[in-house]
Image: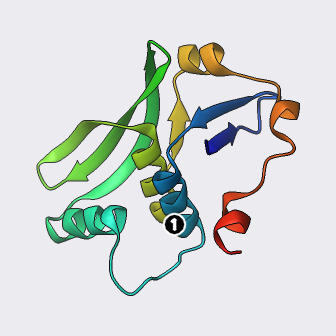
Amino acid sequence: MPVVVLSFEERCDVLPIFIAFEEAMSIARGLDAEDLGRPLTHDLLLDVMEELGGRVDNVVVSDVDEGTYLADLVIATPRGEATLDARPSDSLALVARTNVPLAVAPHVYEYGRRDPEEFEDLDDIREVTHT
């Protein structure tokens, strides 16, 4: 199962978020700014937001419920700010495309933090998907 390992400069530990392969591929494509000619779901979502005058402002991994992480997708719209409940994997795919700030609530970080050495031998999804 793919994992996104979040690390922060001020911390010596990391926060792993396990995600589905499809979302991992979307995140990798977003990080690489890969253009496939036709929009994928996350690209389409950003296009729709832009067409309606909105944009992603930031993402917060805001809570954990029975081991499942929850995220808030904060959207700036012509009517003001809107916060949408979102899966962290979808939110990370949007962060990869927009470079908006990503935050993790302190209690979520404390719940899931791990030693980075546990993840040293992982393959980079970009390397796996381009072979």
Foreground of the two, 44 or 105 = 44
- Residue found at the very far bottom of the displayed protein: 37
104 in relation to 31, above or below = above
Tell me the SS state at disc 1: helix
Left or right, residue 34 beside residue 14: left
Tell me the amino acid under the disc marked 1: Gly
Depth check: give the residue in front, 8 or 23.
23
43 vs 78: above or below: below
Assign the N terminus to one quadrant of the image. top right
Residue 64 location in percent, x, y?
46, 18
Q: Quadrant of residue 48?
A: bottom left
Q: Is residue 129 above or below residue 3?
A: below
- Above or below: residue 80 compared with residue 46: above
- Quarter location, residue 62: top left
Percent of width and height locating residue 13: 79, 27
Label 1 sits on residue: 30
Q: Residue at x 73, y 67 (%)?
A: 127
Give how far across and how far down residue 50 sits, in percent: 23, 68
In the figure, is residue 105 to the left or right of 40? right
> Could you tell me how many numbered marks the image carries?
1
Residue 99 located left or right of residue 73:
right
Disc 1: CA contacts within 10 A as few (<14), some (14-19) or many (>=20):
many
Q: Nearer the viewer, residue 82 or 14?
A: 14
Quadrant assignment for the C terminus: bottom right
Rendered residue at 48%/61% (across/down): 26
Residue 98 appears at what percent x and percent y? 46, 62
| Quarter of the view holding residue 114 | top right
Answer with left or right where residue 86 lies relative to residue 48: right
Q: Residue at x 49, y 45 (%)?
A: 20
